[in-house]
């Protein structure tokens, strides 16, 4: 029998053995995405395979597009009251701070029994670190471990794992989309995952209001840094007049990045007292996480963000100056 | 050794044996797409595996986004002069008319030695019909046959096959995206296909002008038929003022279809003397091909188009009346 992650499989088994008799909180990052939610559902099933009791929580609610996943309705908004005699299993979190600032403080002192993740910046902050930095998604790791352990993969579990892989590979387009990714997806479809249901729920269930907001964003797109940077913006009134919220801007910055010869796409959002900036780079060498850090933010080498007290114009000018030497 | 399409493999072998000593023209459909071009490149390699000489031609040129495929530069615009003592291998064509009207007439009387295709409406018009209506793409069939025949799959061939599968599954989102699709893609990646290169060339190489055209299209989106139809339009001046052409509207109609609860998305384009209409349905039962046929067009159950002498307003009203009973 082919084994996908033999070392991580053993690491996860040790984690489960160490957690015998302990109630586990499976926690993901703030503003959970497909890989986070899919990983939480899958990690809970894997813990149950070892007879462990667990519950799932996040700082923010599950986005509407992911509520089609069976089990997502069991994910609570994090509340300190839940946490009596509980150990923590982090999923899809590069470090303990990714659960969100308030939640991170509330969780200080609790036992960090495990950490399942694929981020290159993972700090190995838990007792058992089930980390593969080459995996495309935390769900890729959990799918591999589930097959390796011969856990029964129901259609619901297969759908959760598939959804995490599909979203975190950018619909099978990012560099980490390996043959292992496709091999696991073939097996997940055999277990009952529906690629069509995933695509429809994630990408084809858009509000007309969101498309009107996209219209406004596209109308503002402009080049900077000799065409190497493409910037679009949304003002407070754009959200008000289209009846949309900040949640509706998901993915907009990718339109800016997808323009020919553009190395970095930027989305600026005017909020009540701050300006949100999102950066997406074509190549990880550009290190937009370092750019974001200059403005109090952070993130990944190719995807980073910040929330700044600067005005939209100030943040725009600051980002352009910071990006210029990196893209030229 | 696992076999993907044992019957079609034998059928293709018989085709190749029947073509011994014959020069073959590998021809695809008008306005070639990823599956068409990928299939032409792959079919030529399979013919070469059997020692056959072939060349590739289409009525229309290969789109820019597909020119990154090695071998695409060898695909000619069809010319009757090429056709001395030549037999025809059709790929990705449901019937002989799909090569385009003029080309179809020019090809009358030539030997139709083969037809490799996955369309449900394939008429089996050739001597050897290598057809699987359950396959997601013609490239899925050709990839399976290539593995079944143990043809050497170079990275270039793997990339062509992968690109055809990726595009014709709608980035792995359409109903025909089976475990076989993912299994074949895993093998193609092992042979050197790059999912990232495919995604970048097909979906992330957009002109800013196209995004400005998209902005205009999104701005016109409106509901009809109690929210079951979503219609957007582009006027002559939209193309002129953004410096774009009709080629830049590829995929726009999918934005209209992707709106929640919308069953049919419509794109109307005002051209010099005609109006182009494009229809995309969420479910094949709606049969937008039948709607298009009422206006002199045609297509697939879920994707159809027409070119009409009606004004934009007349065609809009006509389509709404025709769609109303089908979506309610």
Image (cartoon, coloured by chain):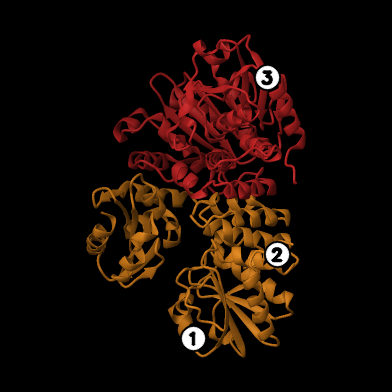
Chain colours: A orange, B red
Where residue A68 sits, quadrant-wise, is bottom right
Percent x, y of residue B293: 60, 23
Percent x, y of residue A8: 62, 72
Percent x, y of residue A114: 58, 80
Which-is-in-front pick, marks 3 and 2?
3
Residue A318 lies, with reference to residue B314, above or below; the image says below
Who's the residue at 49% across and 14% down the image? B79
Where residue B103 sits, quadrant-wise, is top right
Q: Nearer the viewer, residue A196 or B15?
A: B15
Whichever of labels 1 and 2 marks the residue nearer the N terminus, that label is 1
Secondary element at image label 1: helix
Residue A146 lies, with reference to residue A12, above or below; the image says above
Res. A147 mark: 2
Left or right: A72, with B219 as reference point: right
- How much space separates mark 1 and mark 2, taking CA atoms? 35 Å
Q: Nearer the viewer, residue A37 or A211?
A: A37
Mark 1 and mark 2 residues within 8 Å of each other at the beta carbon:
no
- How much space separates mark 1 and mark 3, taking CA atoms? 76 Å
Q: Quadrant of the C terminus of chain B?
A: top right
Residues flagged by tags 1 and 2 on a common chain = yes
Answer few, some or many: residues within 10 Å of disc 3's Cα (few below 14, many 20 plus, some between 14 and 19): some
Residues flagged by tags 3 and 2 on a common chain = no
Which-is-in-front pick, marks 1 and 2?
2
Mark 1 belongs to which subunit?
A: A
Answer few, some or many: residues within 10 Å of disc 2's Cα (few below 14, many 20 plus, some between 14 and 19): many
- How much space separates mark 3 and mark 2, taking CA atoms? 47 Å
| Residue denoted by label 3 | B20
| Residue denoted by label 1 | A106
Who's the residue at 68% across and 77% down the image? A13
Mark 3 belongs to which subunit?
A: B
């Amino acid at each position: 029998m082919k084994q996908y992650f033999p070392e991580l499989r053993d690491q996860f088994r040790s984690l489960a053995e160490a957690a015998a008799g302990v109630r586990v909180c499976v926690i993901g990052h703030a503003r959970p995405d497909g890989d986070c939610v899919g990983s939480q559902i899958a990690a809970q099933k894997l813990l149950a395979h070892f007879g462990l009791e667990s519950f799932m929580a996040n700082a923010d609610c599950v986005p509407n597009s992911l509520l089609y996943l069976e089990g997502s309705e069991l994910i609570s908004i994090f509340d300190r009251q839940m946490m009596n005699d509980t150990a923590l299993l982090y999923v899809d979190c590069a470090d303990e701070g990714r659960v969100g600032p308030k939640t991170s403080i509330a969780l200080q002192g609790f036992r960090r029994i495990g950490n399942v993740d694929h981020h290159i910046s993972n700090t190995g902050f838990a007792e058992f670190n089930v980390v593969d930095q080459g995996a495309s998604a935390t769900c890729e790791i959990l799918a591999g471990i589930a097959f390796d352990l011969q856990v029964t993969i129901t259609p619901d579990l297969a759908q959760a794992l598939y959804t995490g892989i599909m979203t975190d590979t950018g619909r099978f387009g990012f560099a980490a989309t390996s043959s292992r990714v496709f091999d696991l997806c073939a097996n997940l479809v055999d277990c009952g995952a529906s690629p069509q249901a995933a695509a429809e729920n994630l990408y084809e269930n858009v509000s007309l209001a969101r498309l009107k907001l996209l219209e406004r964003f596209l109308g503002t797109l402009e080049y900077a840094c000799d065409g190497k940077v493409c910037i679009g913006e949304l003002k407070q009134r754009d959200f008000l007049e289209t009846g949309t919220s900040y949640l509706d801007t998901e993915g907009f910055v990718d339109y800016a990045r997808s323009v020919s010869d553009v190395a970095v796409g930027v989305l600026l959002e005017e909020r009540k007292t701050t300006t949100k900036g999102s950066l997406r780079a074509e190549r990880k060498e550009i290190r937009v996480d370092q750019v974001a850090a200059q403005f109090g933010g952070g993130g990944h080498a190719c995807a980073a963000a910040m929330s700044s007290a600067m005005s939209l114009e100030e943040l725009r000018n600051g980002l352009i100056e910071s990006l210029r030497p990196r893209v030229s």
